[in-house]
Image (tube, grey):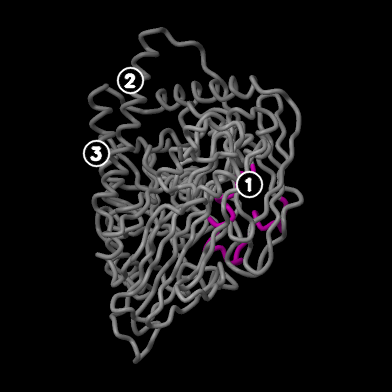
Amino acid sequence: MKDAAPHRPTAPLAALERIRLQVMWNRLIAVVEEQAQTMIRTAFSTTVREAGDLSAGIFDLQGRMLAQAVTGTPGHVNSMAESVAHFLRAFPPETMLPGDHYITNDPWLATGHLHDLTVVTPAFRDGHLVALFANTAHVIDVGGLGMGPEGRSVFEEGLTIPIVKCFEQGRPNDTFFAFLRANSRTPAELEGDVYSLCACNEAGVRRLVAMMEEYGLDSIGPLAEAIFDASLKATLAEIARLPQGTWRAELTSDGYDEPIRLCAALSVREGAIEVDYAGTSPLASRGINVPPAYTRAYTCFGLKVVIAPEVPNNWASLLPFRITIPPGSILNAPRPYPVSVRHVIGQLLPDLMMGCLAQVVPERVAAEGSSSLWNPPLRGGPQVSGPRATCPDFEIITFNSGGTGARWAKDGLSACAFPSGVRTMPVEATENAAPIIIWRKELRPDSAGAGRTRGGFGQTMVIGAADDAEFAVNAIFDRVGNPPRGRFGGKDGAPGAVLRDDGVVLRTKGYQVIPAGRRLVLHLPGGGGMGDPRERDPALVARDVADGLISPEAAARDYGFVKDTA
């Protein structure tokens, strides 16, 4: 990670002390998981409550992440790992008091776009500051153009919140909340989410204090050093098992109005993995640019799930990953470039990392998948139709996923989010939160890339407004012009498609109105296959044909499988 200080391993610990520290480490993970679950139980935004688009973690007083909740997304967690240091520069530890809560959504200080709120809260025991809790959650609306790629600068994308106190010694900052409410289409939900984020951190504080009292700890410093020491040693041991050298890969995103080329050179060195994005396309004029912290977040995730997946994610386990992002690259967007849908390109980076690592450890990687979430922001009512509106104003985002890539010995997962890890939002939750009807939501036959192990299937969705009213979609889709690629002889997954139910093809990115009486049709991409399809077990092909997931024609064409009708 960026600007990381060196960490010196400590002396070996006695066996009983190692056991004690491991028990406390596990307890700490339980603390941050309860922190995350508190947010899920109290959140107003369906993106948090239903999809789990959040992160939660505990940090030492230097802003180093000790532990993260299992619940959460890599883009939030690994960006948050950098953001706490920015909070400490704005509010040094000696200025913090019990009941203070600090907040920002600045894309360059937090997680990469304005729709994520990050809150940091100090934890005190017996009047002494002992730790910091941080969390991030995706919210529905922060004003501006809304979540979409149309902005030409961050100023058009919504309200920017600098690092400020939203609560001071337990009292809400009324001026802050007045500004917040005045700049959102969903003011009650947004204000409620801020209260939820603060409650989430307070739950973590209470559990940490109880843990410290139980174990007689005045400081978590020794525990932090033990966590960092073990994590760094374990990560370095995994890197040492890899051959040294440099490997390259490329990947193409659909982009906004032209394809985007992503290039990476991955070098395995002694004690480090280095990634250089030289050759990647330059900055775009629309909001698909990626701030550097988000680039580092998904780069590190793509490396870690292949190289050291069993090592807990914290400051020290990310330390050996060193990332170079050239200035002017679409992966290194400076302020005030538009970045609202940075995830569309950022979530492709683990596929790119696996393209490099497939040349090193082929049995550990997956084929390319749908990767970027298909999470269309939907809007309706007078703000779309004016006096013609037949329904009230609404703003909703529904999270959906295509298929993941095939693995070496297992098929890909169908309609499952990787690398983001969010849950698919239930139809009922979406329809309950807005006057939206999801008429179809089913697996998409013949969308999985064929292979010895096949990709996961995408899905088909048909969405309309209640009473077939006019509504708008802010399209933020990818993998339409450039489908997920197979590996080692596996075939590509099916590309996505965006259209109306009358067959009119829509743009894959940008604000578009669905006329009254018409519906939005989404065909989500399938994951790429792995290995020669002719090597696949015929019984597995027969199962997919019987389930209606693979047509007899595709089975014959891709697998050489002909159903026995005798």
Residue 309 rendering spot, x and y as whole percentages: 51, 29
Residue 530 rendering spot, x and y as whole percentages: 60, 37
Q: Does the magenta run of residues contain 349? A: yes
Point 66% across, 34% down: residue:
358
Image quarter where the N terminus lies is: top right
Q: Which residues are magenta?
A: 326-352
Residue 342 rendering spot, x and y as whole percentages: 55, 58
Q: Amino acid at mark 1?
A: Arg
Which residue is at the front of the view, 77 or 90?
A: 77
> From mark 3 to mark 2, how far is it between C-alphas?
18 Å
Task: Specify few, some or many for label 3: CA neighbours under 10 Å numbering under 14, 14-19, or 20 or more.
Answer: some
Q: Mark 2 highlights which residue? A: 23
Within the image, what quadrant is residue 70 found in?
top left
State which mark lies toward you, 2 or 1: 1
Point 56% across, 48% down: residue:
554
Q: Is residue 192 left or right of residue 137?
A: left
Q: Does the magenta run of residues contain 39? A: no
State which mark lies toward you, 1 or 3: 1
State which mark lies toward you, 3 or 2: 2
Q: Give the mark nearer the N terminus: 3 vs 2.
A: 2
Q: Is residue 53 left or right of residue 359?
A: left
For residue 485, the mark is: 1
For residue 206, the mark is: 3
- As drawn, the residue found furthest toward the top would be 15
- As drawn, the residue found furthest toward the front would be 566
Point 33% across, 23% down: residue:
24
Residue 380 rendering spot, x and y as whole percentages: 36, 78
Q: Give the mark nearer the N terminus: 1 vs 3.
A: 3
Q: Amino acid at mark 2?
A: Val
Task: Specify few, some or many for label 1: CA neighbours under 10 Å numbering under 14, 14-19, or 20 or more.
Answer: many
